[in-house]
Image (spheres, rainbow, N blue to C red):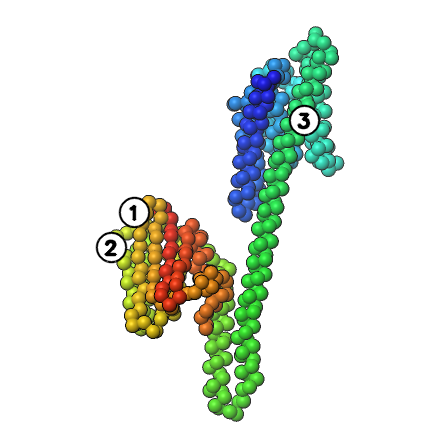
Amino acid sequence: MLKMFDGVFLNCIYLLFPLAIYVVATAHIKNMDKKTNNIFLDVALLSSLYVLFRYGHKIFSIYPMILFNIPLLIGYLKHRKITSIIISILLIIYYHHTIGINYYLLIIEYLIYYIVYNYACSRQLDHFSLIANFVTIKSFIMSLEMFIIFQPNSNIIFNFVYIFCIMSLFTVIAYICVYLLNKGEEIIDLNNTIRALEKEKELRMSLFKITHEIKNPIAVCKGYLDMLEFNNQEKINKYIPIVKDEIARTLILMDDFLDYTKIEIDKEETDLYMLLEDTCDVTKPLFKRNNIQLNCDIPDEELYLQLDYNRMKQVFVNLFKNSIEAKDNTKEESYLNISIAKSLNEVIIKLKDNGIGMDKKTLSRVDEMFYTTKEKGTGLGVVLSKEIINLHNGSIKYSSIAGKYTMVTIKLPLVSEN
């Protein structure tokens, strides 16, 4: 008896393991369409059958492989008609060679399953009704096999009890497998729904914030235009530049928001050191104009990573500009130090300035959309940079003390090196 339970337990593991992989894969692969999902399910069902064929334990002496029919049952329940037909053919061949059941009897049995499946689909029967029909057919076919092929001379009561035990076990295991698979898929659907709701909530908040941010400069423009007197040159000279600045700020806000909502990266093998040197060369005039010392400690060698050159340059230019705008005019000397360190599996880039820094409140909200302490900022630059770094499977972290310094630490995976 203990050996039988061990065999049942192991067969259940062999049966459920590929299906569990299918559930985990569908949970982690984003944007999986219906066709891809069906392909994963087909592979899982065929893998379950193969593992049972290869490693499955014989439970009963006369009809040892009853659980091998469960992948076929799941295939019908999930409406995988072609896959179910393939499984039926494989089971017919397997049962004929291992047990010796006549081909014609097997073909009739699995043809009846197919007919019942089509009937269930036309009547829109639920899963439990289909399983009950499957069990009924299998019990009838098994009775014929027991009384005609396997044990024609045995006691009738013994045969019925034997068939009852086999089909009871099959029914319980089938219901458990179908229940676990359905629950796994329900959890995945629930998580996908929650993610969709969170994205929708985030989009609504973003639209609310951008509407609020755009409303302010438009209101300022309207106020000044209402006060504008076309025969008063002094007011024209005073108000028109303000209106232009507010309109320009609105356009910048819209451009930043559009950049954030349309981030795409195109990775290719890129020399990180050359990218940083190029960024330093481009921004040096800005640092010089603002009397800030730019110290780029970049090794005189090559370091190739899988990067989107233009997007990563956009990140560094944005960080450099933030450093310039954070200059502390009370200090005699201002600087931005750039250093690079390389570990076994990642590259660490640090940018540290001695600007005005950030207090704890500002630091905690530094990557919050539309939050900014700049007079004409949008708060989207930091968010955009973080998103680009995330798409490169990297990370970006800010540390700062008000009045002393700000340090940005970027970590990028060291995929390949030339």
Residue at the image position 44 percent from the left and 52 percent from the top: 391
258 or 336: which is nearer to us? 336
Spot the residue most to the bottom.
Answer: 231
Q: Residue furthest left?
A: 300
The structure residue drawn at horizontal position 39% and vertical position 57%, both measured from the top left corner, is 312
Residue positioned 38% across, 55% down in the render? 410
Q: Which residue is mark 3?
A: 171
Decide which of 61, 354 is in the foreground and name it. 354
Q: Residue 406 lies in what quarter of the image?
A: bottom left
Q: CA distance from mark 2 to mark 1?
A: 14 Å
Numbered disc 3: secondary structure: helix
Under circle 1, the secondary element is loop
Res. 342 visible in picture: yes
Disc sitting over residue 418 in the figure: 1
Check disc 2 and report its element: helix, strand or loop. Answer: loop
Q: Which callout, 2 or 1, points at the residue further toward the start of the chain?
A: 2
Q: Amino acid at mark 3?
A: Thr
Mark 1 vs mark 3: give the one in front: 3
Direction right: furthest residue: 123
**Three-letter residue code for mark 2:** Asp
The residue wearing badge 2 is 300
**Structural distance between the alpha carbons of marks 1 and 3:** 59 Å
Q: Residue 281: x percent and y percent? A: 30, 64
Report whether 112 appears left or right of 55.
Answer: right
Q: Quadrant of the N terminus?
A: top right
- Amino acid, disc 1: Asn
Give left or right: position of 359 versus 185: left
Are circles 2 and 1 on residues that touch, CB within 8 Å?
no
- First in sequence: mark 1 vs mark 3: 3
Q: Residues within 10 Å of mark 1 (few under 14, many from 20)?
A: few
